[in-house]
Amino acid sequence: MAKLINVADDVYQHLAELKGKESFSVIIRHLITQKTNKENVLHFCGKKGVNAEAVKQLAPLWKKWSDVYA
């Protein structure tokens, strides 16, 4: 059963940007679903793990940056 809700214009705009091809219901359901700390950490860090090759490529740049700014 569908219900009507009113939201502020800025909230609607933000939801419209998030939704893409999904429905508003899917996006709202995703946003209100409680996640565990593990899920939050995996989302923050990426679920595929660390790309070792990318880390190797970034190491010299990090060293150069830290020598200058740290």
Image (cartoon, helix red, strand yellow):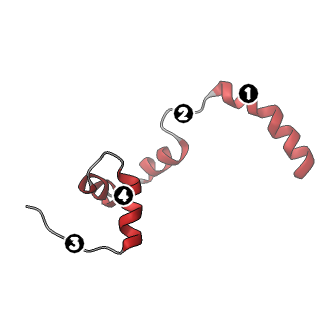
Residue type marked 1: Lys
Q: Nearer the viewer, mark 3 or mark 2?
A: 3
User: Mark 2 — residue?
Assistant: 49
State left or right for residue 42 relative to residue 13: right
Among the 4 quarters of the image, the one containing residue 28: bottom left
Residue type marked 4: Ala
Mark 4 falls on what kind of element? helix
Tag 3–tag 2 contact (CB < 8 Å): no
Using a 10 Å C-alpha cutoff, classify the residue at mark 4 as few (fewer than 14 neighbours), some (14 to 19) or many (20 or more): some
Labels 1 and 3: the sequence-earlier one: 3
**What residue sits 48% from the left and 37% below the top?**
47
Checking the image for residue 56, the label placed there is 1
In the picture as drawn, the residue positioned furthest to the left comes out as: 1
Tag 4–tag 1 contact (CB < 8 Å): no
User: Mark 3 — residue?
Assistant: 5
Mark 1 falls on what kind of element? helix
Residue type marked 2: Gly
Query: In front here: 41 or 25?
Result: 25
Tag 4–tag 3 contact (CB < 8 Å): no
Labels 4 and 1: the sequence-earlier one: 4
Mark 3 falls on what kind of element? loop
**What residue sits 65% from the left and 26% below the top?**
52
**What residue sits 80% from the left and 39% below the top?**
62
User: Mark 4 — residue?
Assistant: 16
Q: Nearer the viewer, mark 4 or mark 2?
A: 4
Labels 3 and 2: the sequence-earlier one: 3
Using a 10 Å C-alpha cutoff, classify the residue at mark 3 as few (fewer than 14 neighbours), some (14 to 19) or many (20 or more): few
Above or below for 4 versus 20: below
Residue 50 position within the rendered picture, expressed as x and y whole percent measured from the top left: 59, 33
